[in-house]
Amino acid sequence: MIKRTLLFGNPAYLSLRDQQLVADITGNEKKQMTAPVEDIGVVLLDSYQITITHQLLNSLLANNTAVITCNEKHMPYGLLLPLEGNTLQSERFKDQMEASVPLKKQLWQQTVQAKIANQRWLLQARGIDVEPMRYFEANVRSGDPDNYEGRAAAYYWKNLFDGLTDDAFIRGRYEEEPNNLLNYGYAVLRAIVARSLVASGLLPTLGIHHHNKYNAFCLADDMMESYRPFVDKLVLEIVNDTKDCSVLTKEIKARLLVLPAIDVLIDGQKSPLMLATQRTTASLYDCFEGVSRKLLLPEFI
C-alpha cells in the first residue's frame, strides 16, 4: 500500500491517540486532523512552532516513517529513521559490509546506466538531441572509470531548462531557482530511499560508490541516483506553469510532495515510486547476499 506524505508548515501540536497521529493546528487556521500512523511514510516538520510528543515520535519510527525536520529556510535539514528496521538486520549488515569491490563497481555501472537512460528520456520528451546521452549510456563500464555519469550530467543540465529560465541554468545547491525546487525534491527523495534501505535491513551509511566521512547517507545517495530524473520532471512541470519559483510556496511544496505516489516502471511493472524504491533496495540486498547480480531500477512509463 502506498504510504502518505504529510507536511506540517504551521504551528501545531502533534500527538498520538489510538494509533492515530492527531494534529491540532494552533495558528490562525485552527483545526484538527488525524491520520493512522500505519498509513504514513514521510512526515515533514516545517515550522519552529511545532511540538511533537515522544510517544508519537516513537510510534512513527516503529512504523518506519521517515521524519524530516526543516530549517529556517524551510529546506529539509534532518532525517530521523529507526535504528532497527528489519528482523535480520545484523546478518544483512554483515553481507553488506562483505560485498566485494567488483560487485559494488558492477552495481554502480547499472545505477549510472539507469540514471543516464532516465535523463535521456526526459531530454527526448523536450525535443532535445539525445545522441550524446545514448553514447554515454552505452559506454559506461564497471565502476564508471570514464566518469560518464559526470559527462552526461554536464550535457543534461546544459539543456534541460534551456529556454525555460531567464538566464542559462546552472545546477548547484546554492544557485538560483529552480535549484531550490530541485533541492527540496531531492531531500524528500533521499528520505524515501533511506527509509526503504532501512526496511531492507541495510545501513544507509555504507555506499557502493559514494564515500564521505561526513555523510551518513552514502548508500541512499547511491540508490537515489536513477530516481533523480523523476524529481526533475516534476520541477520542469512546475517551472512550465509557475511565473515565480524563487519562493517555495505551499502550493509548490504540495506539487513536489506527490513524488512518492507518481508511477514508474520497474521490472516491467507499473508501481508508485515509494514502492519501487523498496523493490530497488530489496534487489540490492539480493546482490549483497549473492543470489542475484542485477538491481531493479526505475524507468519512465
Image: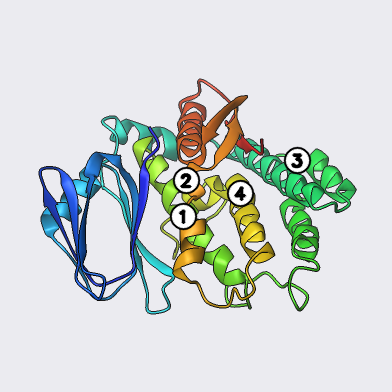
For label 1, the residue is 257
Number of numbered discs present? 4
Instruction: Name the mark nearer the viewer: 3 or 4.
Output: 4
Of 93 and 263, the residue lying toward us: 263
Query: Badges 2 and 1: C-beta atoms under 8 Å apart?
Result: yes
Q: In the figure, 285 relative to 171: above or below? A: above
**Could you tell me residue 270's position as x and y percent?**
57, 29
Q: Could you say whether the residue bearing mark 3 is in a helix, strand or loop? A: loop
Q: What residue type is labelled 2?
A: Pro
Q: Could you say whether the residue bearing mark 2 is in a helix, strand or loop? A: helix
For label 4, the residue is 230
Q: In which quarter of the image is residue 154?
A: bottom right
Residue 205 seen in render: no
Q: In the figure, 294 relative to 118: above or below? A: above
Label 2 vs label 1: CA separation? 7 Å
**Could you tell me residue 161's position as x and y percent?**
74, 65
Q: Earlier in the sequence, mark 3 or mark 1?
A: 3
Q: Earlier in the sequence, mark 1 or mark 4?
A: 4
Q: What residue type is labelled 3?
A: Arg
